[in-house]
Image (cartoon, rainbow, N blue to C red):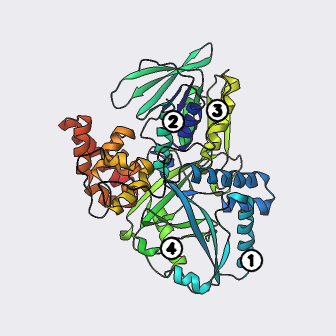
C-alpha cells in the first residue's frame, strides 16, 4: 500500500469492527480495518439471526427492577428499527409465537410483551396478541398438544448476519475505508510508551507490513483479551465466554413462516425455532467454554437441542435429519461472581490501556451501530481527532440505497431474481452482469456461478468457504449440498484468482477439513 498512515485502525472484522469502520470512515477519518481470517468468520456469522430488543432481558429488568437490563432492551429496540430501515434487503419483520401450557402464563406473558411493544413506541413492528389453542395447532401442527392452553404472538426482526457484515464493509469502502481480511496483527509498535502502529502479516501473500496510527481499536470479540495481552501481558481478563450451537432442519418441521420462542426451558434457557432461508433453524445452547479458533459442535449440545424439540413437539427427530450445525462463542462482559453465563447482561464496555489501545468488550449484533458510534466518540477527544458527527443513524447500507418493490432482475427467472434481491438487494443486477451466461450451481438452490465471481470482485472472497459459508450461507443451511458444489466453486476461483494446481488442491483440502469438522 502506498499510504500506510491512518487516522484510525480497527482490529477485527466482525459485527463490531465492521460497524466501527463504517462509522469512522463516514465521518471522514482515514480508516483501516484488519481481520486475521475472513470477515464474520467467528461469532458474527453464527448468531440466532434475530434483530431484537431482548424479551428475556425485559423480564429480568422488571423482576429485579434492573435499570441496566431495561436500558439494554430500550436501546436494542431503537437499533432494531434503524437496522430494518437501513438494510431492508437483509433484515425483515418476523412473527414469533410462544406456546403456553399453564393458564396463569397467558396474562403474564401478554402483559410482558405488551410492555415490550410500549417500549418500542412508534418503532413497534406490530401489537402482541393471544393466539387460541386451535389456531396454535393449525399454524404449528407438530407442536406438543397435551396441556396446551394458548399462545402469545409478538414481533421482532430477522436478518442474514454474515451478509449484513459484508454490506457494512462495502459501505465503509464507499467512504474510502480500507478493509483487509486474512491480515493478522502480530505485534504493536510504540513511541515513548504509546502505541504508534502495528505489524501485520498478510496470510495470503506471506508479506509483513507496518501500518501507522496512534488510534487503534481492538474489536475482536472473543479474542479481545488476547489482543489486550499482546499489548500488555498483565492485562486482566474482561471476558466470560459462552458457546451456543444451532442446528438446521427441513422446513417441514416449521411449515409456518412464523417462529417459535420457548422463553424458559427446564434449565432456564431460551429456545428459538425459526424460519431462515427456507429451512428450520433451532438454537441455542448456553455453556461456559474456553477460547477456540474454530469451536466444534459437541454431541452433548446436539442431544440437548433434540431433547428439547421432543419436549415441545409431538415428534422425534433423528440426528441424521440435521442438515447443518454450527457453534459460536459469545463474548460476554465478565461478571465478578457470576455462576452462569445465562445471567450476564449482554452489554458492552469500552476501555483504554496505558499505551492507548482502545478495546470494546461484549455487545451483540442488534446494537452494533450504537456501539460503533460510542467507540468513535470515545477516541475523538483522546487522540485529538477532528470532531465530526456520527452519520450512521439513517445511512442506507450497500444493497438498499435504490431498493424498491418493483425491482426486477433481467436475464434470470423470477424465482432466481427474488433470491438474488434477498441476498444482494439493488446490486442483484450487477451480480447477474458478472457473467455472460448465468448457471445454477445446485439443482435444489438458486445459487449461481455469477455470485462466486461477483463476491470475488466485490465482497472480499479469497477462499472457497468465504463464499460457501459466509456469502451464500449454503454450508450453514445444507452442508452436504455445499460439498457437492465445492468443485464448481473451486474451478471458478482458480480461473478468477489465477491459482496453480498446488494452490487449488490446498484450498480444496482445507475447505473439506473445515466442512467435515466444524460446520
The circle drawn on residue 172 is: 2
Marks 2 and 1, the one that precedes in the sequence: 1
- Spot occupied by residue 189 in the image (x, y as percentages of width and height): 53, 18
Residue displayed at 58% across by 87% down: 134
Marks 1 and 3, the one that precedes in the sequence: 1
The CA span between labels 2 and 1 is 46 Å
The circle drawn on residue 376 is: 3
- Spot occupied by residue 16 in the image (x, y as percentages of width and height): 57, 41
Q: Do the CB atoms of the residues marked 2 and 3 lie less than 8 Å apart?
A: no
Q: Nearer the viewer, residue 295 or 255?
A: 255
The CA span between labels 2 and 3 is 14 Å
- Spot occupied by residue 208 in the image (x, y as percentages of width and height): 40, 22
The circle drawn on residue 309 is: 4
Comparing labels 2 and 1, the label whose residue is closer to the camera: 2
Task: Please tell me whether residue 506 is drawn above or below residue 275 in the rendered image.
Answer: above
Marks 2 and 3, the one that precedes in the sequence: 2
Residue 292 appears in the picture as rendered: no
Task: Please tell me whether residue 424 is drawn above or below residue 104 in the rendered image.
Answer: above
Reading the image, the residue beneath label 1 is 107
Marks 2 and 4, the one that precedes in the sequence: 2
Asked whether, in this view, residue 41 is left or right of residue 375, the answer is left
- Spot occupied by residue 402 in the image (x, y as percentages of width and height): 49, 47
Residue displayed at 50% across by 30% down: 177
Comparing labels 2 and 3, the label whose residue is closer to the camera: 2
Marks 1 and 4, the one that precedes in the sequence: 1
Q: Secondary structure at mark 2?
A: helix
Comparing labels 2 and 4, the label whose residue is closer to the camera: 2
Amino acid at each position: 500500500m502506498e499510504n500506510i498512515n491512518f487516522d484510525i485502525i480497527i482490529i477485527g472484522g466482525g459485527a463490531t469492527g465492521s460497524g466501527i469502520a463504517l462509522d469512522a470512515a463516514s465521518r471522514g477519518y482515514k480508516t483501516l480495518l484488519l481481520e486475521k481470517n475472513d470477515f464474520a468468520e467467528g461469532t458474527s456469522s453464527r448468531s440466532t439471526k434475530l434483530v431484537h430488543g431482548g424479551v428475556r432481558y425485559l423480564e429480568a429488568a422488571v423482576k429485579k427492577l434492573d435499570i441496566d437490563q431495561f436500558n439494554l432492551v430500550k436501546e436494542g429496540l431503537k437499533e432494531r428499527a434503524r437496522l430494518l430501515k437501513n438494510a431492508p434487503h437483509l433484515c425483515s419483520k418476523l412473527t414469533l409465537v410462544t406456546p403456553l401450557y399453564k393458564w396463569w402464563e397467558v396474562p403474564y406473558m401478554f402483559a410482558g410483551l405488551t410492555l415490550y411493544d410500549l417500549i418500542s413506541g412508534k418503532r413497534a413492528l406490530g401489537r402482541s396478541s393471544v393466539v387460541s389453542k386451535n389456531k396454535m395447532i393449525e399454524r404449528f401442527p407438530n407442536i406438543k398438544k397435551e396441556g396446551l392452553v394458548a399462545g402469545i404472538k409478538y414481533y421482532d426482526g430477522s436478518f442474514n448476519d454474515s451478509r449484513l457484515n459484508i454490506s457494512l464493509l462495502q459501505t465503509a469502502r464507499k467512504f474510502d475505508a480500507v478493509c483487509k481480511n486474512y491480515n493478522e496483527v502480530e505485534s504493536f509498535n510504540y513511541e515513548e510508551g504509546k502505541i504508534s502502529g502495528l505489524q501485520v502479516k498478510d496470510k495470503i501473500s506471506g508479506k509483513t507490513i507496518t501500518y501507522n496510527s496512534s488510534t487503534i481499536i481492538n474489536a475482536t470479540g472473543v479474542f479481545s483479551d488476547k489482543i489486550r495481552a499482546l499489548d500488555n501481558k498483565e492485562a486482566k481478563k474482561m471476558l466470560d465466554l459462552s458457546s451456543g450451537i444451532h442446528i438446521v432442519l427441513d422446513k417441514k418441521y416449521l411449515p409456518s413462516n412464523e417462529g417459535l420462542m420457548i422463553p424458559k426451558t427446564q434449565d432456564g434457557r431460551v429456545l428459538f425455532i425459526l424460519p431462515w432461508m427456507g429451512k428450520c433453524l433451532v438454537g441455542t445452547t448456553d455453556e461456559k467454554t474456553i477460547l477456540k479458533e474454530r469451536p466444534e459442535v459437541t454431541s452433548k449440545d446436539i442431544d440437548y437441542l433434540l431433547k428439547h424439540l421432543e419436549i415441545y413437539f409431538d415428534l422425534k427427530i433423528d440426528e441424521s435429519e440435521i442438515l447443518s450445525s454450527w457453534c459460536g462463542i459469545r463474548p460476554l462482559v465478565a461478571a465478578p461472581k457470576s455462576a452462569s453465563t445465562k445471567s450476564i447482561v449482554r452489554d458492552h464496555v469500552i476501555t483504554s490501556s496505558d499505551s492507548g489501545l482502545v478495546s470494546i468488550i461484549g455487545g451483540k449484533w442488534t446494537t452494533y451501530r450504537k456501539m460503533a458510534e460510542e467507540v468513535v466518540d470515545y477516541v475523538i477527544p483522546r487522540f485529538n481527532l477532528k470532531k465530526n458527527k456520527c452519520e450512521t443513524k439513517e445511512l442506507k447500507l450497500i444493497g438498499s440505497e435504490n431498493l424498491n418493490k418493483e425491482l426486477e432482475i433481467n436475464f434470470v427467472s423470477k424465482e432466481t431474481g427474488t433470491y438474488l434481491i434477498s441476498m444482494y438487494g439493488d446490486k442483484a443486477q450487477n451480480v447477474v452482469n458478472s457473467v455472460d451466461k448465468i448457471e445454477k450451481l445446485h439443482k435444489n438452490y438458486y445459487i449461481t456461478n455469477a455470485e462466486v465471481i461477483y463476491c470475488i470482485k466485490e465482497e472480499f472472497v479469497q477462499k472457497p468457504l468465504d463464499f460457501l459459508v459466509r456469502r451464500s450461507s449454503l454450508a450453514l443451511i445444507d452442508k452436504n449440498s455445499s460439498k457437492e458444489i465445492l468443485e464448481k466453486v473451486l474451478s471458478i476461483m482458480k480461473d478468477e484468482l489465477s491459482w496453480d494446481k498446488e494452490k487449488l488442491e490446498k484450498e480444496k483440502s482445507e475447505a473439506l477439513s473445515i466442512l467435515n469438522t466444524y460446520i
